[in-house]
Image (cartoon, rainbow, N blue to C red):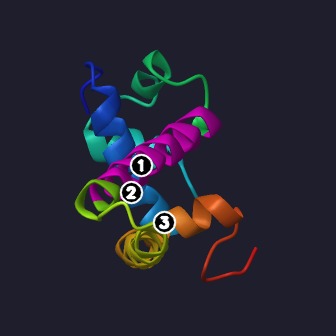
Amino acid sequence: MEGGSVSRERLIQAGIQELEANGLHGFSLRRVAQQCGVSCAAPYKHFKNKGELVEAIAQHYNAQWAQRQREVMDHTEKDITRQLQEVCKEYLRFLLDNSNYCILVTLTDAATGK
């Protein structure tokens, strides 16, 4: 394993995979580093601890949701009722596409309920 540098975005993507595989309570910064092929210390160049990485993952999801919401709003007429309906539908699609987001929002693992 190399000790080299790894981008913040690469760590976030590996963190998403780690979250999917092991849930919030089984989340391991060591495995994230291993998946990126870097030393266990390398992620600490970007994140103080695993909590900061999990927070960055949540921010990543929030940014994705905000983008999708903007796209829906841009493609719907100024009909407020229709906008609300379309945003709600898109939010459900977003949750289906990003099950890890539910883990972060509820701070529980789907498998364990904890």
Is 24 situated above or below 67? below
Among the two numbered marks 3 and 2 on one chain, the one whose residue lies closer to the N terminus: 2
What count of labels does the image hold? 3
Q: Is residue 75 left or right of residue 20?
A: left
Which image quadrant for residue 102? bottom right
Do callouts 1 and 3 mark residues in contact (Cβ within 8 Å)? no
* Coordinates of residue 109 in the picture (x, y in percent): 64, 72
SS of the residue at dot 3?
Answer: helix
Of labels 3 and 2, the one closer to you? 2
The foreground one among 66 and 75 is: 75
Q: Name the amino acid, label 3.
A: Asn
Q: Name the amino acid, label 1.
A: Ala
| Label annotation for residue 100 | 3
Give the CA distance from mark 1 to mark 3.
Answer: 16 Å
Identify the magenta region.
51-71
Principal secondary structure, stretch drawn in magenta? helix
* Coordinates of residue 58 in the picture (x, y in percent): 52, 47
* Coordinates of residue 62 in the picture (x, y in percent): 48, 48
Do callouts 1 and 2 mark residues in contact (Cβ within 8 Å)? yes
Residue that numbered label 1 is attached to: 66
Residue 74 magenta? no
Give the CA distance from mark 3 to mark 2.
Answer: 18 Å
Could you tell me which residue is drawn at 59 percent across and 38 percent down?
50
Quadrant of the drawing holding the C terminus: bottom right
Q: Is residue 37 left or right of residue 109?
A: left
Residue that numbered label 2 is attached to: 69
Residue 54 magenta? yes
Could you tell me which residue is drawn at 64 percent across and 38 percent down?
51
